[in-house]
Image: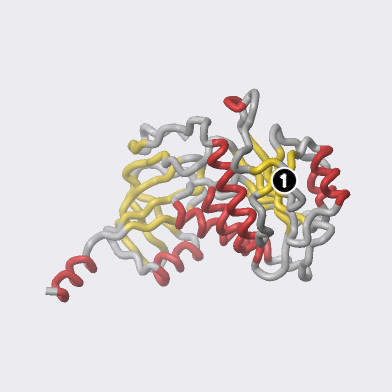
Amino acid sequence: MISSFTYLFRDMPRKYRIYHPCECQSGPLRIVDAETLHYLRNVVRIRTGDQLTLFGKGSMEWIGRVQAMDSEGIVVDIQETNIPLTEPSVRIHLGVAAGKGYKLDEVVEMTTALGVTSILPFIANYSVTERRNPDRLDRLKKIAISACRQSGRVQVPQIESVSESLQVLLKHQAWPLLLFADERGGIDLVDFSIQAGAENLKEAALFIGPEGGWSDMERELLKGKGGIPVHLGPRILRMELAASMAVMLLERLLGRIHPAKPGCMSPSEATP
């Protein structure tokens, strides 16, 4: 009996998501990108008839089934589109102090899944960082794509190169709402409330400092840009945990603004 069920489920069509930053049309689409083909062929071992969802262009995803496979690519028959409820209605820009090791990798992975729009790494006065790696930005972008694929997001966050200081990062930036986590105290983010104009708020920025804390100069820079200090509780958190927790709380705070309604349609009916 167990063997029969094993064969039954083995033959059932499976569902996968891939990053495809191009607009699709109804009908057959040939996938030829080498990295995507490697993932489909060697990682998930896709088969004819499996469902494939493509994301990465606008707020929609395209859904189809694998029609054919050959040495040159995989053909997907695009049948419908979907607008999922996975993108926040308020864009969140996360400024985060670059740290040593894989801390920034973890921040990108977790906060991408939580819905940030962009990630702005910088070197803080008390940051402990390693030698700059020119390939790091490409790796971070791949981590973000993987997190979108797993979490159901359709828009990959923009990841900027590491700024040499907070001052350089803030020089040409302005947001209607700027919060920064401060271990010295501030407004409890759980109890924080937006007063007038909340219904018109379209974007917000959230800054997380290094585990060594902000310098006095950095605090003044943030406050000079209208930054409001907030805290996440009585304990000192690791940078990657603080970033994830703060993003989650801020998204919940901003969730009063109604998101777009999801739905499925044929590609000919879709309006990007």
Q: Residue furthest left?
A: 1
Residue at x 52% of width, y 49% of height: 21
Tell me where residue 71 appears, x and y as whole percent. Answer: 39, 68
Quadrant in which the N terminus appears = bottom left
> Looking at this rendering, what residue extends furthest in the top direction?
196
* Residue positioned most to the bottom: 3
Chosen colour scheme: secondary structure
Asked which secondary structure carries label 1, the reply is: strand
Residue 150 visible in rendering: yes
Seen in the image, is 146 located left or right of residue 187? Answer: left
How many labels, in total?
1
The residue nearer to you, when weighing 225 against 46, is: 225
Nearer to us in this view, 136 or 27: 136
Determine the residue positioned at 56% across, 42% down.
251
Q: Which residue is mark 1?
A: 180
Crowding at mark 1 (Cα within 10 Å: few <14, some 14-19, many 20+): many
From this view, report whether residue 256 is shown above or below residue 133: above
Q: Position of residue 52 (x, y in %)?
A: 36, 54
Which residue sits furthest front? 234
Front position in the image: 262 or 66: 262
The amino acid type, in three-letter code, at marker 1 is: Phe
Q: Residue at x 44, y 56 (%)?
A: 18
Q: Is residue 66 left or right of residue 207?
A: left
Q: Is residue 161 visible?
A: no
85 left or right, relative to 178: left
Q: Position of residue 233 (x, y in %)?
A: 64, 51
Between residue 55 and residue 101, name the one nearer to us. 101
| Quarter of the image where one finds residue 72 | bottom left
- Residue 224 at x, y = what percent? 84, 38
